[in-house]
Image (spheres, rainbow, N blue to C red):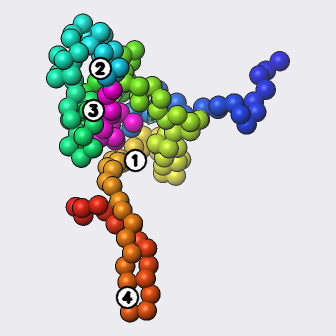
Amino acid sequence: MGKKVTDEQPRVYFDCSKCPAFCCSVYERVQVTKRDLNRLAKYFELTPEAAQKRYTKIDRSSGDRVLRRKKDVIFEQACMFLNQETRGCTIYHARPGVCREYPDRSRCAYYDLLKFERRQQDDQTVLPLVQITFREVEKKTVHDENSSERIWEWKGKV
Ligand code: SF4
Ligand code: SF4
């Protein structure tokens, strides 16, 4: 008898092998913790200091330590560990925790977008290009003569 699927059971609606690795490309920041760094160092048989210098950098906007990136053949940039031909991770067993957890739910928004556009365009070779950039926002109150309104605004407008 087949396994009964209930709402509590995770159902996976994406297939990374059919995706050009959006998640390894569109995010500018892939966070690296101390634990991730030790794992990377062990994998490459380096000291954590050497691994930190070679594979990571500090992201200027968040102050987080992140993986370095490089020019990509499909997207503008991608993680330095992405194999640009196979679109697979070259350090799969040593990848950071955030990569292990992603997308942390049964659906992947990029995979849905990919499937949607391919169906919409009736073309299985179409590739929607997206880039995600995060900026901080703050809520402000703006006034005119008769009323006031709460609006969202970019912090330190760019
Ligand atoms: S974007 Fe989604 S489907 Fe594509 S590789 Fe990442 S997790 Fe998999
Ligand atoms: S470490 Fe691997 S899984 Fe994580 S972003 Fe880079 S290529 Fe993708």
Q: Which mark is residue 128?
A: 1
Please state which of the two labelled residues, at mark 4 or mark 3, is closer to the viewer: 4
Q: Where is mark 4, residue-wise?
A: 144
Which of marks 3 and 4 precedes in the sequence?
A: 3
Cβ–Cβ under 8 Å for marks 3 and 1: no
Which of marks 3 and 2 precedes in the sequence?
A: 2
Q: Residue 8: within the magenta?
A: no
Residue appearing at x 52%, y 52% in the figure:
120
Please state which of the two labelled residues, at mark 4 or mark 1, is closer to the viewer: 4
Residue appearing at x 44%, y 78% in the figure:
149
Q: Amino acid at mark 4?
A: Asp
Q: Quadrant of residue 70?
A: top left
Q: Where is mark 2, residue-wise?
A: 37
Residue appearing at x 35%, y 59% in the figure:
137
Q: Please, what secondary structure does the residue beneath circle 1 have? A: loop
Q: Visible in this render: residue 90?
A: no
Q: Quadrant of residue 4?
A: top right
Few, some or many residues within 10 Å of mark 1 (<14, 14–19, 20+) = few
Which of marks 2 and 4 precedes in the sequence?
A: 2
Q: Amino acid at mark 3?
A: Val
Is 38 located above or below residue 61 in the figure?
A: above
Q: Where is mark 3, residue-wise?
A: 66
Which residues make up the magenta segment? 23-33
Q: Residue 25: within the magenta?
A: yes
Front position in the image: 10 or 75: 10
Residue 3 as seen in the image, left or right of residue 150: right
